Image: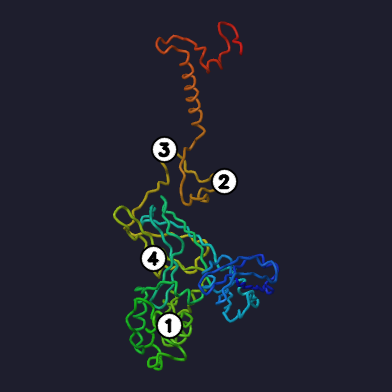
Amino acid sequence: MANTLVVVLDATQIDKEARSQQKVKVGVRASSGKIRSQIVAITAEKLELKFAADARGADVAVGPADASDEDLFRLQTITRRVSSASWLKLTTLVLPPLVITPFYWLFWLRWCRDFVIHGRVLCPDGTPVPGAVVQAYDVDYLWWWSSRQAAGPAVVTDASGSFTIKFRWCCGWLPIWWWRLRHWALEPLLAARILPVLRLDERLPPIPKPDPVPDLRVFAGLLDSTLKTTGTTAGLVLPPPDRIDPTSLAKLRSLLLPKLPLVPELQRLRLWPWVSWTPWTDCTPDIIFRVTQDCGRGEKVIVAETVFDTRWNIPTVLDVTLHANEDACCGVITDEPEGDCAVITKACQTLITDIEQNTANTLVGLANLPAYVAADASALYARNVLNFLALSLDAKSGAFAVPRDDEIVKAVLICENGQVVPRG
């Protein structure tokens, strides 16, 4: 016999006028990992949704409608664990209401946002770089490690070096899921800044050489003797790389800050532990760019931005100019076209640069188009007259002879031998 799980949503804390602002998604994940979901509008203070259920246990999550089924259980949503013992011998189980609070409601409204990046890639002399592949990355920095995640698809610059990247950015991850989904690597530029600072303070013990992946045990020497001998202090554990819990970083930071020198440069880079760090709640990406181009000699990296080029908390619409290195193949744009041409800047009072696909482009056309109409019309009329007269001339002798059986002649012949030609 099939089991039914009834999920009750309680929206009494959400103003009636605000309930139309968004829909919510309710997901039920069975013990097998299979997820069933429903998207529902909040049309009443309480709603009931029914799911085919697994009596062996399940997880329930409520979140914004635009979250994927998988992310519903990875992000900060309202969750409930349903154990197998909850069922007993029931075939229908009604859960206690899941209360949607104003905190979650407002958070879900800004959960995901659309971003657009407009830009140009230019050579050192200011000429455009056409046919280059542009990729934007969201970046995060932890001590001397960095993580990159593609922000939108890779795009190719047009003839004017222009490009547009569009992407959707979501926030509110559960810390452990955010950490697992990121790939980390050693950032040599950060290590080169941090190590000299630490060596200036003779009271600080030597720091181990940087590891290629985050390892919090690198801080053991900076902490007290209790930590060095037992591996713990005040309940803090420094785990191996594969067991890092990012929520423990706040406590570790509180222990490290009193022992580290104040470094304004590293604060400006928003580098942990000098700056608090919870990127899983960051709803605005921090962007750098990488640009490559193949001019027939193999792919070359022509723009490679670093931590020092990071654009922090970008707006939803960003305009950038990227400057390529000497490996770039440059294009040419002539601002003043030669000959009898005109540069078109508007179409029906709309700027050419405001028309889709014409950003930063120049349209070139004839300067006085009406003046060319008469000449073309005269040439067309002359050609028609010539072709008509050719019907009335003998191809061999050239003598004038009207072909009465020709369809065109029949249609236009009015008089013949002084008489009006009757119409049949």
- Whichever of labels 4 and 2 marks the residue nearer the N terminus, that label is 4
Can you say whether 214 is above or below 388 in the image? below
Q: In terms of depth relative to the viewer, which is nearer, 209 or 102?
A: 102
Q: Amino acid at mark 2?
A: Gln
Q: Which residue is mark 4?
A: 305
Residue shown at 53% from the left, 66% from the top: 68
Q: Amino acid at mark 4?
A: Glu
- Whichever of labels 2 and 3 marks the residue nearer the N terminus, that label is 3
Q: How far apart are labels 4 and 3 at the CA level? A: 42 Å
Can you say whether 20 is above or below 340 in the image? below
Structural crowding at the residue carrying mark 2, measured as other residues with C-alpha within 10 Å and reported as few (<14), some (14–19) or many (≥20): few
Viewport quadrant of the N terminus: bottom right
Structural crowding at the residue carrying mark 1, measured as other residues with C-alpha within 10 Å and reported as few (<14), some (14–19) or many (≥20): few
The reply to whether callout 4 and callout 2 are in contact (CB within 8 Å) is no
The reply to whether callout 4 and callout 1 are in contact (CB within 8 Å) is no
- Whichever of labels 1 and 2 marks the residue nearer the N terminus, that label is 1
Viewport quadrant of the C terminus: top right
The image's colour scheme reads rainbow
Q: Which residue is mark 2?
A: 349
Structural crowding at the residue carrying mark 4, measured as other residues with C-alpha within 10 Å and reported as few (<14), some (14–19) or many (≥20): some
Q: In terms of depth relative to the viewer, which is nearer, 9 or 77?
A: 9
Q: How far apart are labels 4 and 2 at the CA level? A: 39 Å
- Whichever of labels 1 and 3 marks the residue nearer the N terminus, that label is 1
Q: Give the label on residue 275, or none.
A: none
Q: In terms of depth relative to the viewer, which is nearer, 315 or 136?
A: 136
Tell which tag, 4 or 3, sits nearer the viewer. 4
Tell which tag, 2 or 3, sits nearer the viewer. 2
- Left/right placement of residue 171 relative to residue 192 reads right
Q: Which residue is mark 3?
A: 339
Q: Which residue is mark 1?
A: 262
